[in-house]
Structures are given as structure tokens and as C-alpha cells.
Image (cartoon, grey):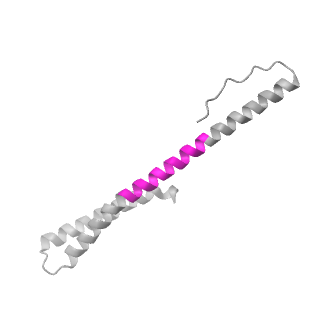
């Protein structure tokens, strides 16, 4: 990231004012570029975190579906699968809300 320099003090001439204005404009462009870079980095990290959290949730949802539909699973296993499903849906909503502005 570009390091900001101290702005020159106005002396009163039009040339000095024009140079100071140009320097200020350069600084503003550098700051804007830094902010844009940080925004892109944050969005990328949110997207990656969303992906990393969804992957195990998909596995949990898949196995809970198997438990619910498997004829050999007992009632306790089916109740546990229902609890897993409710929590997977809740966590998915949280992840979607957190990553909504990155898509």
C-alpha cells in the first residue's frame, strides 16, 4: 500500500495550489485503491468461509437424511436426524446472511 506523504503547505501562488490539489488527488486515489483492495479481500474471505462451513453441513444433512429414511434406524436415530436437520437449516441461514453481500 502506498504511504501517504505530508501535503505541502499553501504558499499562495496558483502553481502551488495546483500542485497541492494534484497531490491531494493522488493521495485520494491511493486511499480509494487501498479501500477497494480491502473490500475485495473481505468479500473473498467471507465467500471462502461460507464454502468451508457449508461443506460439513452438507455431509451432516446427507447422513441425517440416510438416518431418517433408513428402515433399520431406530426412533432415537430418527429423532437425532431431525435435530441435525433443524440445526443444519438454521446454520445455513446464518451462513447465507453472513455471505449475502459477497455473491
Q: Is residue 5 left or right of residue 14?
A: left
Camera-nearest residue between 74 and 50? 50
Q: Is residue 28 left or right of residue 35?
A: right
Rendered view: 85 above or below 24: below
Segment colored magenta: 34-52
Camera-nearest residue between 102 and 81? 102
Q: Residue furthest front?
A: 2
Residue 27 in percent (x, y) is at 68, 33
Q: Residue at x 74, y 30 (%)?
A: 23
Camera-nearest residue between 16 and 65? 16
Quarter of the image holding residue 62? bottom left
Residue 77 in percent (x, y) is at 15, 70
The N terminus is located in which quarter?
A: top right
Q: Residue furthest bottom?
A: 71
Residue 20 in percent (x, y) is at 77, 27
Residue 75 in percent (x, y) is at 13, 73
Q: Is residue 32 left or right of residue 14?
A: left
Rendered view: 77 above or below 70: above
Report if residue 47 lies within the magenta region. yes
Q: Residue at x 19, y 67 (%)?
A: 80
Magenta region, mostly helix, strand or loop?
Answer: helix
Quarter of the image holding residue 95? bottom left
Report if residue 67 lies within the magenta region. no
Amino acid at each position: 500500500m502506498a504511504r501517504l506523504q505530508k501535503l505541502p503547505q499553501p504558499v499562495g501562488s496558483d502553481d502551488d495550489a495546483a500542485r497541492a490539489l494534484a497531490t491531494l488527488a493522488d493521495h485520494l486515489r491511493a486511499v480509494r485503491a487501498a479501500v477497494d483492495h480491502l473490500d475485495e479481500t473481505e468479500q473473498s474471505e467471507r465467500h471462502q468461509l461460507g464454502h468451508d462451513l457449508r461443506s460439513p453441513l452438507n455431509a451432516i444433512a446427507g447422513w441425517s437424511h440416510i438416518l431418517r429414511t433408513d428402515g433399520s434406524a431406530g426412533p432415537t436415530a430418527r429423532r437425532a436426524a431431525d435435530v441435525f436437520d433443524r440445526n443444519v437449516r438454521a446454520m445455513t441461514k446464518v451462513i447465507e446472511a453472513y455471505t449475502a453481500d459477497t455473491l
